[in-house]
Amino acid sequence: MTEDRFIQLLQGFHDRKLSEEELRSFLEAAGDPRFESMISGQLYNELAQMKAGSITDEQKADKVWHSINISINSNVQQPAHRVHFMKKAWIRYAAAAIILAGIGAYFWKSDNKPEQQEIVKTDVAPGHEGAVLTLADGKQIILDSLGNGMVAEQNGTAVLLQDGSLLYNAGKTSAVTYNTIATPRGRQFRVQLPDGSVAWLNAASSITFPTAFVGDDRPVTIKGEVYFEVKKDAKTHFKVRVNEHTEIQVLGTSFNVKAYNDDNSINTTLLEGSVRLHAFDKVQLLKPGQQTQVNAGGDITVMNNANLEKIMAWKNGLFNFNDEPLREVMKQLERWYDIKVKYIGDPPNLKFFGELGRDLTLSQVIESLREIGIQFTIEGHTLTVTPKSS
């Protein structure tokens, strides 16, 4: 098959316009190394939408989805240090599974688009890069629409915006002033700190730090979720304070901290290097691949072989909903789409599986999440979740 022909089939697949013969040809070609890089994310999302749309044909669709999940879990387990997932080899297994299990789901979805669209009265765009910078004097600067260049100068430190990231070039100074970068819901951002360390902020997060690190420590304070790549400096310790009870100390390492106020615990996950967690007068040393969970009562739980692909999905532009309950999925959607989720009746005890791109609109995401016994409705910036029995 030529590349041009494959592109035509890919577009036809996306638009639900392929005949049964064309669909078979497309799925058989999906595992060809020449085409994998062109369709990985899109094919995954389309397969997820097949599952979501196949309500009256659930037995066949469930077989397809179950086969795909088995293929993902058994054939594409990545080494613990990898943070990218779901990109190439599993597609040939997913394609084979859908051919073997039947392709009725695809055509059922095509014939029932009007019913799907009734649940969407308005749509919500995905989040994007942006943040609010608060300077030492309290002045606030919205970074979303600024172009490259100087943003501010504070005590000899130049604050620059470059290609959507904020950089601090510290000069010679002994004065210590603090800045805060906050991402509202529906935003994410990257900042290079004065020592060269880099922090990525997920939605509804913040980081407070000095405009120049002086002395023996490099202290920062965070809220929400932040991923760090810390520049190694044997003379000074990089310290991340989460709250009055929890602090993380590092030399040079890569780690993720998830500490939203509505979460049940503070989760610190180490990718590379080593960190020492101090919480409630307890100390815990982490090794790569481990995660600590600190609950409100001060208990510390250590998990070995943490699912790094899932934990880092947000930074890599993905939602990873593998084994996630409904309420946790809705929390992620609230933060990324800046919406309010309202439940009518008792939420079903469901868990979701799979990954979706964070560049999808809200309606595209919920179409992929719909399950038997649950209904989603978008009105303005409110997503209503209703059991079918209500």
Image (cartoon, grey):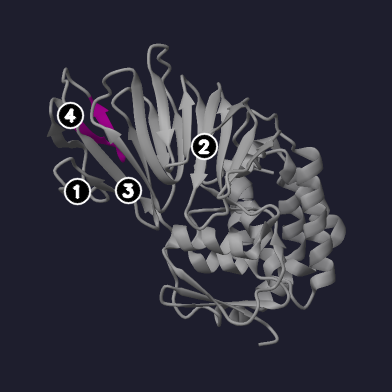
- Residue 84 seen in the current view: yes
Between the C-alphas of marks 2 and 3, the distance is: 17 Å
Name the amino acid, label 3. Ala
Task: Give the residue displayed 64% in from the left and 65% down from the top.
Answer: 326
**Residue sitting nearer the eye, 125 or 283:** 283
| Quadrant assignment, res 61 | bottom right
Label ID, residue 158: 4
Residue type, numbered disc 4: Ala
First in sequence, mark 2 or 1: give its number.
Answer: 1
Of badges 2 and 1, nearer the viewer stands: 2
- Disc number at residue 182? 3
Question: What is the number of the mark on residue 256?
Answer: 2
Query: Badge 1 is on which residue?
Result: 141
Whole-number angstrom distance, CA of label 2 to CA of label 1:
26 Å
Count of number-bearing discs: 4
Determine the secondary structure under disc 4.
strand
